């Protein structure tokens, strides 16, 4: 057995019927030109063949009750996994549109995982127009975060379009890396040893953590500091209670367009993403007649996993930044976001890496307590919306000769946060996944459209003004 880390276990603690804590990934493939009619059926048969399952796909909870998950969360290897349950085949009515695909994935993402089994499902979806199919995979957030999830699915893919007889994702073992503290054996001595080590780290890092918390408190007292603190965002329609039904919307942009804007605006790619989201949310809320007078804030996950760490589990910290939704002028909005993210980065960089886990738990504990106490969506939110940007593969990838055309993240939401926006880069594109509550946020799909219009608007504002050609004055010769 293996014990779960504190942050991983927290996703189990806040699981409920209305707030399932799984995340997903939607991959769209184009069939090979010479693919037979039975290509997907054959692919499914190979995936379900008698392969040995690798971690974390083989893990299931030792204690599946809520009390067991809360008090003694631990994984054990399941030797009798029913792949017919975990790997499923669906079809759209041909020719299925991307809208119909989004409706199906929204329905699949709304269903909670079975805690008596390993916490994952994989759905092969055929019938997509233009000779394409989709692969939708979901796993519980206690097993993976965004970065590790992308790496997990990327391991099985190849840059060689001619490669065949490839392993399914759940049979590819991770590269050997240094052991993580959260992977220790789930025994009483191991738990005691880890608790002592955690206390020692807490004692060593206490002055740094106190300093970080004081900076956040001071930023509330002195708003001109530009450091955005928790609980400073307003209550909005994004921050109500949610139900269990989800809705997915997607958008796709070329990275070259966004990177060109980073140069003309002297902003980072994350700044541009936040600007597009903030501008879209401002327009959406104006149409709903519910734009708050003060700006919405964004919780931004930050990867703290070492580059050589191929492990799974959660390894993130958080920044909080303003979205400047109260600013009517686009350029002022962008500059405000740039200043806010710069201060948030400076704040986080003052902490040593060894203190980031403790800082994250301190920062996120009010959020977790809101959910566990039932106060989520009933009081001021820690931040208004989660927006993350996950780096993905840079080169085109293939599976059994089928080209991966796009990847879209499908994330989780909770009480007090009815919208999640996650971006995932792949092969020169940036793919937005908007995950929202079907009942709390009607017409959420408009947000995807509005980010595109915000991009067009910013490009127009930043385009160099075309100078009018000088006109030559006519002169008359003196006679």
Image (spheres, rainbow, N blue to C red):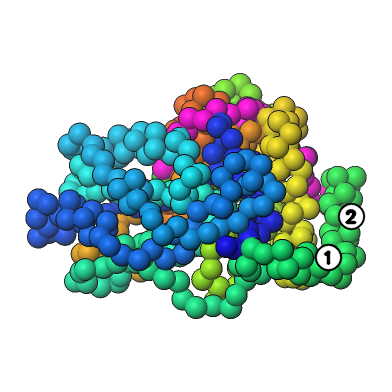
Of the 4 image quadrants, the one containing the N terminus is bottom right
Vertical arrangement, residue 95 with respect to residue 180, above or below = above
Of the 4 image quadrants, the one containing the C terminus is bottom left
Q: Position of residue 319 (x, y in %)?
A: 69, 54
Marks 2 and 1, how far apart at CA: 21 Å
- Residue found 31% across the figure and 65% down from its top: 51
User: Which mark is on residue 290?
Assistant: none
- Residue found 26% across the figure and 68% down from its top: 166
Magenta region, mostly helix, strand or loop?
Answer: loop
Left or right of 100 on screen, residue 204: right
- Residue found 19% across the figure and 46% down from its top: 130
Q: Is residue 169 visible?
A: yes
Q: Position of residue 111 (x, y in %)?
A: 44, 36
Left or right of 441 on screen, residue 99: left
Q: Position of residue 27 (x, y in %)?
A: 34, 52
Instruction: Please provide the residue range marked out in magenta.
Output: 224-250
Which residue is label 1 attached to?
199
In depth, the one of 469 and 85 nearer the eye is: 85
Which residue is label 2 attached to?
214
Report if residue 234 lies within the magenta region: yes
Give the quadrant of residue 389: bottom right
- Residue found 69% across the figure and 56% down from its top: 6
Q: Helix, strand, or loop for circle 1?
A: helix
Q: Position of residue 216 (x, y in %)?
A: 83, 52
Answer with mark 2 or mark 1, whichever residue precedes in sequence: 1
Vertical arrangement, residue 398 with respect to residue 114, above or below = below
> Are there few (<14), some (14-19), or many (20+) residues within 10 Å of tag 1?
few
Report if residue 37 lies within the magenta region: no
């Amino acid at each position: 057995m293996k014990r779960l880390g504190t942050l991983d276990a927290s996703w189990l603690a806040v699981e409920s019927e209305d707030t399932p804590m799984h995340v997903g990934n939607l991959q769209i493939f184009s069939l090979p030109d010479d693919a037979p009619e039975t290509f997907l059926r054959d692919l499914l048969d190979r995936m379900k063949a008698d392969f040995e399952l690798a971690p974390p796909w083989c893990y299931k909870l030792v204690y599946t009750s809520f009390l067991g998950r809360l008090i003694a969360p631990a994984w054990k290897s399941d030797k009798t996994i029913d792949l017919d349950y975990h790997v499923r085949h669906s079809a759209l009515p041909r020719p299925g549109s991307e809208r119909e695909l989004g409706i199906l994935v929204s329905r699949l993402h709304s269903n909670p995982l079975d805690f008596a089994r390993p916490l994952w499902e994989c759905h092969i979806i055929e019938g997509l127009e233009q000779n394409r199919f989709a692969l939708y995979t979901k796993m519980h957030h206690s097993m993976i975060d965004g970065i590790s999830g992308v790496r997990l699915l990327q391991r099985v893919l190849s840059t060689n379009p001619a490669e065949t007889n490839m392993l399914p994702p759940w049979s590819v073992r991770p590269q050997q890396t240094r052991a993580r503290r959260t992977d220790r054996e789930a025994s009483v001595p191991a738990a005691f040893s880890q608790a002592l080590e955690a206390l020692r780290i807490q004692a060593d890092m206490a002055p740094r953590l106190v300093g970080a918390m004081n900076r956040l408190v001071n930023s509330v007292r002195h708003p001109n500091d530009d450091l955005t603190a928790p609980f400073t965002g307003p209550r909005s329609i994004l921050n109500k209670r949610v139900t269990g039904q989800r809705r997915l919307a997607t958008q796709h942009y070329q990275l070259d367009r966004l990177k060109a804007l980073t140069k003309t605006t002297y902003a980072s790619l994350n700044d541009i993403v936040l600007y597009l989201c903030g501008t879209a949310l401002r327009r959406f809320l104006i149409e709903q007649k519910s734009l708050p007078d003060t700006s919405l804030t964004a919780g931004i996950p930050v990867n703290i996993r070492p580059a050589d760490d191929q492990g799974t589990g959660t390894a993130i910290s958080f920044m909080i930044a303003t979205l400047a939704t109260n600013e009517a002028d686009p350029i002022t909005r962008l500059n405000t976001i740039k200043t806010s993210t710069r201060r948030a980065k400076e704040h986080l960089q003052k902490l040593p890496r060894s203190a980031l886990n403790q800082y994250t738990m301190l920062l996120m504990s009010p959020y977790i307590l809101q959910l566990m106490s039932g106060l989520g969506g009933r009081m001021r939110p820690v931040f208004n919306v989660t927006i993350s940007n996950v780096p993905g593969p840079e080169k085109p990838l293939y599976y059994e000769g089928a080209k991966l055309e796009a990847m879209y993240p499908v994330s989780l939401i909770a009480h007090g946060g009815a919208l999640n926006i996650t971006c995932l880069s792949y092969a020169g594109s940036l793919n937005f996944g908007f995950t929202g509550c079907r009942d709390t946020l009607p017409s959420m799909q408009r947000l995807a459209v509005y980010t595109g219009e915000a991009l067009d608007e910013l490009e127009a504002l930043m385009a160099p003004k075309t100078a009018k050609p000088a006109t030559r004055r006519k002169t008359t010769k003196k006679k």
